[in-house]
Image (cartoon, grey):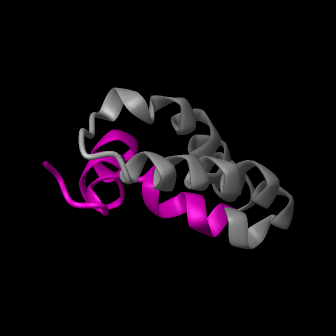
Amino acid sequence: MFPFYWYFTSALPRALRAAYLMAPLGVLYDRRLLRFVVPAVTFICLYSILPHKELRFITYVFPVLNLAAAIFVVRM
């Protein structure tokens, strides 16, 4: 069994690479992304409660987080 924070410390950084670091910056830069990113992060938090964790459970949030990272890169 993985700890509660496993998705945030292991799964997401390995799956998103540099976009994992740029997604929060994209949200800080463009506040309109909050209405997309907050439900995605809430989804990950809810799935973190489950004892059985797999990366395939949260692959649906990758496009949303990549969108936030892409917005930051474009505006940078």
Q: Is 71 in front, or is 6? A: 6
Q: Nearer the viewer, residue 56 or 18?
A: 56
Stretch of the chain drawn in magenta = 1-26
Question: Residue shown at 81%/54% (left/top)?
Answer: 35
Q: Is residue 23 above or below residue 36?
A: below
Outermost right residue:
32
Q: Is residue 18 left or right of residue 27?
A: left
Q: Is residue 23 left or right of residue 39?
A: left
Q: Is residue 51 above or below residue 9?
A: above
Q: Position of residue 39 (x, y in %)?
A: 68, 50
User: Is residue 4 located in the magenta-colored stretch of the structure?
Assistant: yes
Q: Quadrant of the C terminus?
A: bottom right
Q: Horizontal and vertical percent for residue 25?
A: 61, 68
With respect to residue 27, does 73 lie above or below? above
Give the vertical position of 58 relative to 38 (above or below): above
What residue appears at the point 43 percent right and 45 percent down from the top-left corner?
A: 47
Viewer-nearest residue: 3 or 33: 3
Residue 32: image quadrant is bottom right
**Quadrant hosting residue 52:** top left
* Residue at 75 percent of width and 48 percent of height: 36
